[in-house]
Image (cartoon, helix red, strand yellow):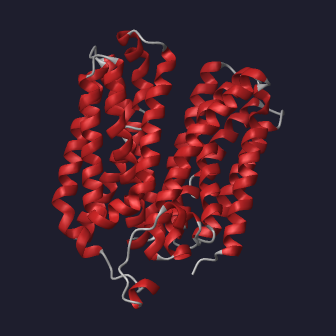
Amino acid sequence: MFIFLISVLYLAFISLGLPDSVLGSAWPSMFVEMDVPVSYAGIISAIIAFGTIISSLMSDRITFKLGSGKTTFISIIMTALALLGFSFSTRFWMLCIFAIPYGLGAGSVDASLNNYVALHYSSKHMSWLHCMWGLGASIGPAIMSYALTGGQSWRNGYLYISIIQFVISFVVLVSLPLWKSRIEAPTKTEDEENNEPVKPLSLRSIISIPGAKAIMLTFFCYCAIEVVVTLWASTYLNLFRGIDAEISAAWGSLFLVGITVGRAINGFISMRLSDTSLIRIGQGIILLGEIMIIIPISNVLSLIGLVVMGLGCAPVYPCIIHSTPARFGADKSQAMIGVQMASAYTGTCLMPPLFGLIAEHINIALFPVYVGALLILMIVMHEYLCRRIPIK
């Protein structure tokens, strides 16, 4: 039973990643066919991101009522239906409508799944499961590419991914009884000892928890770094360092490969080192990678620096998530992970376009300074968190 359930969780994390990079792959065909400006991709992306923020903040209430298994099943069904809607869309406004359940489903399943794994599984599984997210994020564009290069429409690509999501949702549905059997009796809270009913926490109550703001800022900075580097590193290397555009793009994609491979490796290392140690090591490796990009000795060194930064990013996200129940308590972990997810999505929405304005109106040479400032703030907030709220 353990093998079956952990396999289902791995599938669920693949389903999380499947839709994440598809819009970028399909948009060159979509905007031409729909006769809209190329910039309209940002509207769809913003609607999806807003939905993920809202559903992440609501994840504590939703999971409290439905449980992690049902929340995961419903969320995957929502994203499957949204992707199916994309495949039938003939107008831009239709894409905007289907982007709403797309985002709402993604945020709920992300927060609920991460909390379930953090409560019931070791750090190695958290790293390997997030490695599966990277696999899903790579498979999605590959499926879209298969459809487009095979003479099919982008709609077929979305249809294929939707079918995979429906299949995964069915597997999750079959596994629901096992999710219940994995739930352990939580430690009694003060409210329970006073015979007061346990209720999901309000957003104000969550933010007032000691250390909540620090971990939210830590997550905000990490996810901002990940997306800023993904989006702008290749352009920086091309325009400022003079590296050929194709070479910059190819090595830029290796940043994500570094994250995926790094998480696979991190699963083994986590058997010997704590989450806190792995986060600190990861931050140090990110700094090393950035130094390699900045040093004007060799373009090859700068390109390798991107891969090194990806390897450094690998342990940060899963280890912060996995340490949340131990740091804040199992009774608060779902609420805390929900606001962490919301902070993550907020960082990915705000910080990349902000650097775009800096690059356009000031100088793209400020890319390392921008990433470095985010990294320093992340390190400071994480160290403050470790001192203020040590892991129990």
Viewer-proximal residue among 192 and 111: 192
Regarding residue 189, the answer to whether it shows in the image is no
Viewer-proximal residue among 17 and 273: 17
Residue at image point 62% right, 44% down: 224
Regarding residue 92, the answer to whether it shows in the image is yes
Where the C terminus falls, by quadrant? bottom right
Viewer-proximal residue among 27 and 291: 27
- Residue 376 on image: x %, y %: 76, 53
- Residue 315 on image: x %, y %: 57, 58
- Residue 13 on image: x %, y %: 36, 52
Q: Toward which corner of the image does residue 316 lie, by quadrant?
A: bottom right
Residue at image point 45% right, 55% down: 57
Viewer-proximal residue among 23 and 389: 389
Q: Toward which corner of the image does residue 383 lie, by quadrant?
A: bottom right
State the count of labels: 0
- Residue 244 on image: x %, y %: 67, 19
340 versus 156 height, above or below: below
48 versus 312 height, above or below: above
Residue at image point 24% right, 37% down: 81
Where the N terminus falls, by quadrant? bottom left
126 versus 197 height, above or below: above
Residue at image point 56% right, 41% down: 348
Answer with left or right where residue 202 lies relative to residue 250.
left
319 versus 171 height, above or below: below
Answer with left or right where residue 33 lies relative to residue 156.
right
